[in-house]
Image (tube, grey):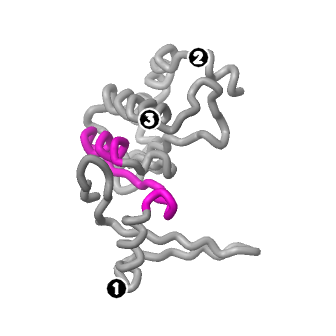
Amino acid sequence: MREVIDEVDPEEITPLFDDFFRPLQRGKHLEQYSVSGRYIAAIDGSQYFTSEKISCPGCLIKEGKRLLGRLRKPHPKLSFIIVADGLCSKQPAIEEVLALRMDYVLVAKSDDHEMLMEWVNEQRALKEVTRWEVREKDRTRIYEWVNVGPYAGLPFCLHIP
């Protein structure tokens, strides 16, 4: 699959996406997949489709930013929630999401975001962290999040709304 995907220019299949998307949207078939009136767009598929041509994190961030722009351009009024992995929880990607008037849910791994994790730990001690536990047969998954917080990056500290 990787070899096939690498050879296809995304611009070539964009009209096909629009051909399917518009009737589904007009028929209100997509509303069941929205959250609070926002469409969810997951922009990570690296576990399923990886590329031999794109390999460095910086290249992937740049391509992610281009993808966000390609998503926004034909749909300037739609509300989106971007869902992405830790690679996208870097300042350039967050700035692009905000500039395109999108909301987001991003993974922030502790080894990538030490200052942020220190702040989250302080918020946890103050009982300001929302926690959700999902119990399964042989494990419990724990999800924790904060809705507002500082993000330390370069060249300045971005405040996450």
Specify which label sits upstream in the sequence, 3 or 1: 3
Viewer-nearest of labels 2 and 3? 3
User: Label 1 sits on what residue type?
Assistant: Leu
Q: Nearer the viewer, residue 51 or 112?
A: 112
Residue range in magenta is 91-113
- Residue 152: quadrant of the picture: bottom left
Which residue is most to the bottom?
A: 126
- Circle 2 is placed at which residue position? 8
| Residue type marked 2 | Val
**Quadrant of the image for the N terminus?**
top right
Labelled disc at residue 61: none
Q: Position of residue 100 (x, y in %)?
A: 27, 38
Seen at 64% across and 33% down, the residue is 50
Q: Label 3 is placed on what type of residue?
A: Gly
Can you see residue 24? Answer: no
Secondary element under disc 1, as helix, strand or loop, is: loop
Q: Which residue is mark 1?
A: 126
Could you say which is closer to the camera, residue 151 or residue 21?
151
Q: CA distance from mark 1 to mark 2?
A: 50 Å
Q: Residue at x 44, y 37 (%)?
A: 61
